[in-house]
């Protein structure tokens, strides 16, 4: 009798875990469909900001930076942040549905080190990081990363960091949209 209870409990836990994985997989697929729709729409109004409008204090963008928002009927659907750093270029794309963050795509392109000259080549980069972060109701539900990134330090919370950056960038884009109406 006791063995039957233990087996039933284990099976229940395993089936619950399987159902949860299926739910997350379905949500991720819905998010993928949405950001593909956003990327395929060429009718968005494009708003560009340079660094004085959005760069965070304490962060040095020695290679320049830009923030570009894509909106329709005053609703922001996508924001692209490009930051040139001394080690390479960071590109982060934020995607929104119903004014909520649903997906973040992040890349880092590192400058290639030239062993002969002993310096970094600023005209040549290689993609050294890719991150995909999936959100539902302002909660990070899954992420996939390759390479090394800023979230390797356990004290940096990707959910909190990306939501904070997203809000800050959204506010900057909305201010600009308000000023050009």
Image: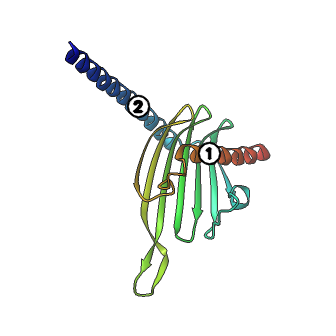
Q: Position of residue 124 (x, y in %)?
A: 45, 73
- The answer to whether 29 is drawn above or below residue 174 in the figure is above
Inter-mark Cα distance, 1 to 2: 22 Å
Q: Quadrant of residue 18?
A: top left
List the residue tagged with mark 2. Answer: 24
Which circle's residue, 1 or 2, is located before the other in the chain? 2
Q: Could you tell whether 31 is left or right of 58 in the image?
A: left
Q: Residues within 10 Å of mark 2 (few under 14, many from 20)?
A: some
Cβ atoms at labels 1 and 2 below 8 Å apart: no
Q: Nearer the viewer, residue 67 or 146?
A: 146
Taking depth in this image into account, of 12 and 114 the one nearest to the observer is: 12
Residue identified by numbered label 1? 166
Is 98 above or below relative to 124?
above
Q: Quadrant of residue 84?
A: bottom right
* Model colouring: rainbow
User: Above or below — where is 138 with respect to 167?
Assistant: above
Image side of residue 66 versus residue 22, left or right: right
List x then y, in percent, for residue 162.
57, 46
Residue found at the very far top of the displayed protein: 1
Secondary structure of the residue carrying tag 2 is helix
Residue 143 place in picture, x, y as percent: 44, 44
Question: Residue at point 63% right, 62% down?
Answer: 65
Pick the residue in front: 16 or 123. Answer: 16
Q: Position of residue 180 (x, y in %)?
A: 77, 47
- For the residue labelled by badge 1, is the local secondary structure a helix, a strand or a loop? helix
162, above or below 97, in the image: below
Write down the quadrant of residue 44 in the picture: top right
The residue sitting at 48% across, 78% down in the picture is: 120
Residue that protrudes farthest toward the bottom in the picture: 117
Looking at this view, name the residue that lies furthest to the front.
Answer: 2
């Amino acid at each position: 009798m006791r063995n039957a209870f233990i087996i039933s409990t284990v099976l229940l836990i395993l089936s619950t875990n399987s159902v949860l994985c299926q739910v997350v997989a379905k949500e991720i697929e819905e998010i993928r469909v949405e950001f593909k729709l956003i990327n395929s729409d060429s009718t968005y109004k494009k708003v560009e900001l340079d660094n004085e409008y959005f760069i965070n204090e304490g962060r040095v963008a020695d290679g320049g930076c830009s923030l570009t928002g894509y909106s329709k009927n005053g609703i922001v659907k996508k924001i692209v942040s490009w930051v040139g750093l001394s080690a390479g270029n960071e590109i982060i794309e934020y995607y929104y549905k119903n004014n909520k963050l649903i997906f973040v795509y992040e890349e880092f392109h590192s400058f290639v080190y030239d062993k002969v000259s002993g310096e970094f080549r600023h005209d040549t980069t290689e993609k050294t990081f890719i991150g995909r972060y999936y959100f539902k109701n302002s909660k990070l539900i899954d992420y996939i990363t390759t390479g090394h990134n800023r979230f390797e330090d356990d004290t940096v919370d990707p959910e909190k960091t990306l939501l904070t950056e997203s809000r800050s960038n959204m506010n900057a884009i909305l201010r600009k949209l308000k000023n050009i109406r």
